[in-house]
């Protein structure tokens, strides 16, 4: 079976290398006019079917037919990361796209190449609904797209980009294997470590991860950091802001004293430590195939097949892997139930609570369990805490990492079909549009105030357990999800080159056999690297001083 599975995985990789999407796929370019909408979509984990389905539904709307009686829609898609930028750089004479869904387009915000969406999209009421686009977009996500003119003393919020991805990233797990190994879903990072020790002791691999996709860096480290410091503390770091004991704030290099960054790295160090002793049950938690030349699709396919119990990824996993899963099942593989856990809370958070009422990890776990059950009592089975401690853990339980910040839809300022493009973006945010997107992406949802279960129960019933769990979590009545801002959305990062760590290769270092570089060293090196002069220069470049 192992040999057959290996051969199948190799075949899959070879087949993937042959899949090339032409630049002119889809309907091809049509005539360029005010009644034509030409769309480009960059294909990533969520695929591109969503844009085709949205376009069809958009054309069928009565208000669209009335506004654009001769509407034609042309769609182009490919996997070329720089295609969107290249089209914008071509300018009005050569680029005829009216709506471009691409990646890393924030540099164009505030310039002459793309349209300001503040009044044309964000402040407009959505078709058939009562909320504006801005009101319906989750507040914690909106901050990723705001633009401030650094040359103005008191800049207003402006928007040049719109999200076309969303969802959640975190730790996927094989529910069937956890049940087989009699392991309860971890609620704290200490419990996650203990689960890994138990799994490794049984001769199994706790984690499987592609060496070329350092999702640990992107999707869990910053969540543990924000849990420890709180969302405000996390944001303060990237704002360059230090709050003193009197509640006064100032811009200074004291941000590098934040211990949450160190504590989160300590968790990674503990879980990722790798040595030459293959018999160790307290390290080498990553499956050996995670290293070498295997790419991420191979490792994700292996995870689907039961190799490894945990895997860092996002809610695009279902859609991205549906063909691989069908292949596995056709070849006799087991249909495992894959879900995404709520990211375990960093155990050291008890050292940064407003008081000392949480005694140990067991009490922390008991409190988290109560919160997951929707309880608000300060005293319950296994815990007795203050209101401040309860609130701290409650916030931490609802901090997640999202995917919307790095990708965005933009409208070229000179586009002939820009009015249609504005309306298309607004349509995407309606309940109808959001339902179409969810159906096309196997249950993934955009970051708007929208409950798929309530709005389109037929679509909800058809999706996987992974996305059903995520949707229930995102629409909790107990507390609003806090989606972390992307570092790239902060002016100090974008213009001042601020980084959480001077050497960001912590995933690679921790997984090197014989590595001696510790989390503490990463932390200390960063503090030494960011001198007061360097930091003030960064503040100046970001328009902070």
Image (cartoon, rainbow, N blue to C red):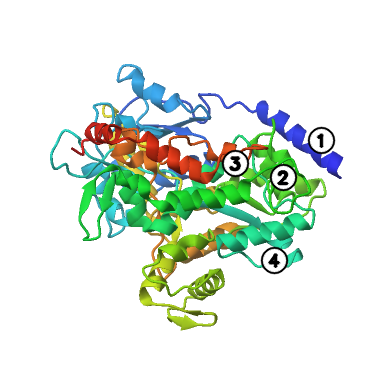
Secondary structure type for disc 1? helix
Picture quadrant where residue 509 is located: top right
Query: Which comes sooner in the sequence, label 4 or label 1?
Result: 1
Residue under pointer 1: 7
Residue under pointer 3: 510
Secondary structure type for disc 2? loop
Asked if the residue at tag 4 contacts the one at tag 3, i.e. Cβ–Cβ closer than 8 Å, the answer is: no
Query: Which comes sooner in the sequence, label 3 or label 4?
Result: 4
Real-space Cα separation, disc 2 to disc 4, in angstroms: 19 Å
Q: Quadrant of the N terminus?
A: top right
- Residue drawn 28% across the image and 33% down it: 538
Residue under pointer 2: 287
Q: Is residue 387 left or right of residue 242?
A: right
Real-space Cα separation, disc 4 to disc 1, in angstroms: 32 Å
How far from the left and from the top, in percent, is residue 504?
Answer: 48, 36
In this view, the mark in front (1 or 2) = 2
Q: Is residue 39 left or right of residue 496?
A: right
Real-space Cα separation, disc 1 to disc 3, in angstroms: 30 Å
How far from the left and from the top, in percent, is residue 190?
Answer: 59, 61
In this view, the mark in front (3 or 2) = 3
- Is residue 64 visible in the rendered image? The answer is no
CA neighbours of label 1 inside 10 A, class few (<14), some (14 to 19), many (20+):
few
Residue 512 vs residue 99, the one in the foreground: 512
In this view, the mark in front (4 or 1) = 4
How far from the left and from the top, in percent, is residue 36?
Answer: 35, 31
Residue under pointer 4: 183
Residue that protrudes farthest toward the top in the picture: 93
């Amino acid at each position: 079976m192992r040999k057959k599975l290996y051969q199948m995985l190799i075949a899959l990789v070879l087949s993937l290398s042959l899949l090339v999407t032409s630049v002119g796929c889809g309907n091809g370019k049509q005539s360029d006019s005010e009644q034509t909408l030409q769309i480009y979509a960059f294909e990533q984990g969520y695929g591109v079917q969503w844009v085709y389905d949205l376009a069809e539904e958009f054309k069928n709307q009565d208000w669209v037919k009335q506004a654009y009686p001769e509407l034609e829609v042309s769609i182009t898609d490919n996997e070329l990361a720089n295609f969107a930028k290249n089209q914008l750089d071509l300018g009005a004479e050569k680029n005829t796209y009216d709506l471009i869904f691409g990646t890393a387009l924030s540099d164009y915000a505030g310039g002459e190449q793309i349209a300001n969406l503040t009044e044309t999209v964000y402040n407009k009421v959505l078709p058939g609904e009562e909320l504006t686009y801005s009101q319906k977009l989750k507040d914690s996500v909106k901050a990723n797209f705001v633009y401030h003119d650094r040359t103005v003393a008191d800049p207003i919020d402006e928007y040049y980009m719109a999200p076309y991805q969303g969802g959640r990233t975190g730790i996927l797990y094989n529910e069937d294997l956890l049940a087989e190994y009699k392991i309860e879903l971890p609620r704290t990072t200490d419990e996650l470590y203990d689960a890994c020790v138990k799994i490794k002791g049984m001769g199994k691999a706790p984690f499987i991860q592609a060496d070329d996709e350092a999702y640990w860096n992107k999707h869990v480290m910053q969540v543990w950091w924000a849990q420890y410091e709180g969302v405000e503390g996390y944001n303060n770091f990237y704002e360059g802001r230090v709050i003193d004991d009197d509640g006064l704030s100032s811009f200074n290099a004291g941000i590098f004293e934040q211990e949450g960054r160190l504590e989160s790295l300590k968790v990674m160090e503990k879980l990722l430590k790798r040595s030459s002793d293959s018999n160790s049950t307290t390290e080498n938690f990553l499956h050996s195939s995670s290293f070498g030349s295997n790419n991420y699709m191979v490792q994700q396919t292996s995870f689907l097949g039961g190799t490894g119990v945990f895997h860092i990824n996002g809610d695009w996993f279902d859609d991205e892997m549906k063909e691989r899963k069908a292949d596995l099942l056709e070849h006799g593989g087991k249909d495992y139930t894959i879900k995404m856990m709520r990211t375990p809370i960093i155990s050291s958070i008890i050292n940064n609570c407003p008081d000392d009422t949480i005694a140990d990890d067991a009490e922390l776990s008991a409190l988290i369990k109560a919160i997951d059950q929707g309880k608000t009592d300060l005293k319950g089975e296994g815990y007795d805490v203050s209101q401040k401690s309860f609130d701290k853990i409650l916030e931490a339980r609802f901090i997640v990492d999202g995917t919307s910040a790095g990708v965005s839809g933009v409208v070229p300022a000179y586009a002939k079909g820009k009015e249609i493009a504005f309306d298309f973006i607004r349509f995407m945010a309606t309940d109808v549009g959001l339902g179409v997107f969810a159906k096309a992406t196997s249950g993934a949802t955009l970051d708007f105030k929208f409950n798929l279960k309530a709005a389109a129960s037929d679509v909800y019933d058809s999706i996987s357990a992974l996305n059903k769990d995520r949707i229930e979590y995102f629409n909790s009545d107990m507390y609003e999800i806090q989606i972390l801002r992307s570092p790239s959305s902060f002016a100090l990062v974008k213009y001042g080159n601020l980084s959480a760590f001077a050497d960001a290769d912590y995933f690679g270092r921790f997984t090197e056999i014989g590595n001696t570089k510790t989390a503490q060293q990463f932390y200390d090196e960063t503090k030494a690297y960011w001198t007061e002069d360097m930091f003030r220069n960064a503040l100046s470049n970001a328009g902070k001083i």
